[in-house]
Image (cartoon, rainbow, N blue to C red):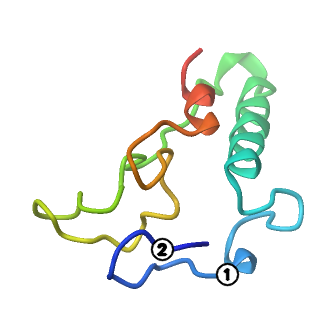
Amino acid sequence: MSNGDDLENLVTTADQLPDGASYPASPTGQADYFEALRGVFGDVPGGHGLGFVAWEPEWVPGVGWEPGAGNPNDNLAMFDFSGRALPSLRSLRR
């Protein structure tokens, strides 16, 4: 729930996250959530659950609407504040 820039984040407490009790607000919790989500789509009958899209997974500090701008989603990205991939990114590749 930390903030990587001067712009206030939209999500500031774990209770704002879906299934916050089951998936802690951490890189591991984020990865576990996306893997569970992948499992739900895999169980859709008839192969109709093709997958999901993680909207704007790269909102890191300094990459806002314009170069150098902050963004309110930097603590929800699939990259850390330095731009290194988090474990959750693996759930998009398969």
Residue type for callout 2? Asn
Residue at 39% x, 49% y is: 82
- Above or below, comparing residue 8 to residue 70 in the picture: below
Q: Name the residue tied to disc 2.
A: 3
Examine the image and state in which quarter residue 66 appears. bottom left
Name above or below for residue 3 compared with residue 29.
below
**Which residue is the site of mark 1?**
13
Which residue is found at the position 42% from the left and 67% from the top?
Answer: 73
Which of 17 and 26 lies nearest the eye of the viewer? 26
Q: Residues within 10 Å of mark 1 (few under 14, many from 20)?
A: few
Location of the N terminus by quadrant is bottom right
Quadrant housing residue 47: top right
Three-letter residue code for mark 1? Thr
In the image, what residue occupies the spot 73% across and 65% down?
18
Task: Indicate the secondary structure of the residue bearing disc 1.
Answer: loop
Residue 75 position in % (x across, y down): 51, 64
In the image, taking residue 66 as reference, residue 18 lies left or right, namely: right
